[in-house]
Image (cartoon, grey):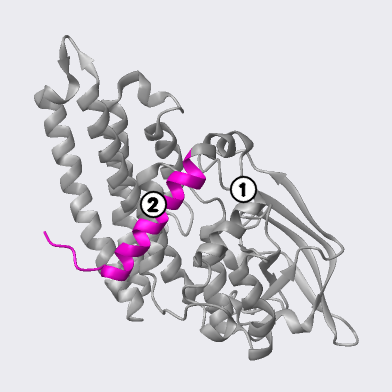
Amino acid sequence: MRRTVFNEDHEAFRETIRAFIEAEVVPVHDEWFAAGQVPREFYYKLAELGVFGIRVPEEYGGAGIDSHKFEAVMYEETSRAGVTFGGSGVHVLLGLPYIQMLATDEQKKRYLPKFVSGEEMWALAMTEPGTGSDVAGMKTTAKLSADGTHYVLNGAKTFITGGVHADRVIVCARTAAPREDDRRFGISLFAVDTTSKGYSVGRKLDKLGLKVSDTAELAFVDVEVPVEDLLGEENKGFAYLGHNLASERWGIAFGAYAQAKAAVRFAKEYVQERTVFGKTVASFQNTKFELAACQAEVDAAEAVADRALEALDAGELTAAEAASAKLFCTEVAHRVIDRCLQLHGGYGFMNEYPIARLYADNRVNRIYGGTSEVMKSIIAKSMGL
């Protein structure tokens, strides 16, 4: 089937990204994998390519293109090459929407030029050690000072992707107690400078997958956050978080589809080269049937991911539709990558092969951004159940 989601500009960008990956990433990716993060300097290279400013208005140094399609191209190209760009995805997919939606003109002038240049990398700190999907249960607090000039931030966050290298973190904290009839009330968002006194990065977490993406624990002890760094209005943070979850879940869905597509490519190349009993693995009927079934699933996931992308760009992607896309694409990726690893035999279990890393990286897709069970609950509610 002919794909219509991308145009000539997107394909030209694809060629640029593919060449960049071949020259700047592939030769050193194993070193990044061993280190558990990309070098901070790498983000400046991405900034030079213009990837951080695609959706940023021109007045702040960006390209002013209101579309997620260039991000989609990057998902496909990094997956195709079996590499990742560290926490840069969080910077663009999670950080930028909050700035665009909530920042005042004064804040945009302060934040966006450094966002585009890579001078300030952004992350989002929502999850706490005792609260995952139950965002309303967070304990981190931000109390307004007596003179009204700053908030005093106390608490802790965990599983913060990009948390090691982040220069600004959007921290979700309670500025008021929850109401009896509304536990979601009282949450506010702050653009916290990570050089602030009392702000600290704890452990760089040792994860099953996404080894190249730095994930950290954060702690706040009497961190003074200027009132000028409050994003949006006080106590309305939960609604803001919900508003941006659709784009986050689309990103996870599209990334999962791209991983599944890459897995089929890796498996096809492997079975065409690997010989067993004097024949290539690709010549066996079971191999052909397995890859054919995987390709059919990838085709379906691609259609769902593309449709969600078009809806997102049009401002029409609903919470239930984003949940449905995430649920479907992540479950497809789980099945496809597992079957493609099986076709690699014992070598599929070795980290030197991209399918092994892809298998580990993919697992979190059904957890973060809302678990598959939460996605099902959202979809069921939209059905009136």
Q: How many marks?
A: 2
- Residue at 53% from the left image edge and 67% from the top image edge: 52
- Say which quarter of the image contains residue 28: top right
Q: Mostly what secondary structure, the magenta segment?
A: helix
Q: Residue at x 40, y 58 (%)?
A: 16
Based on the displayed image, in which of its 4 quarters is residue 190 positioned?
A: bottom right
Is residue 59 shown left or right of residue 244? right
Amino acid at the residue labelled 2? Arg
Answer above or below: position of 136 versus 46: below
Q: Image point 41% across, 79% down: which residue?
A: 66
Image coordinates of residue 309 in percent, x first then y, are 31, 69
* Residue 208 is one of the magenta-drawn residues: no
Residue topped by disc 1: 214
Farthest residue to the bottom: give it. 105
Q: Which residue is mark 2?
A: 18
Residue 311 position (above or below residue 120)? below
Q: Position of residue 122 (x, y in %)?
A: 63, 65
Q: Which residues are magenta?
A: 1-26
Residue type at mark 1 is Asp
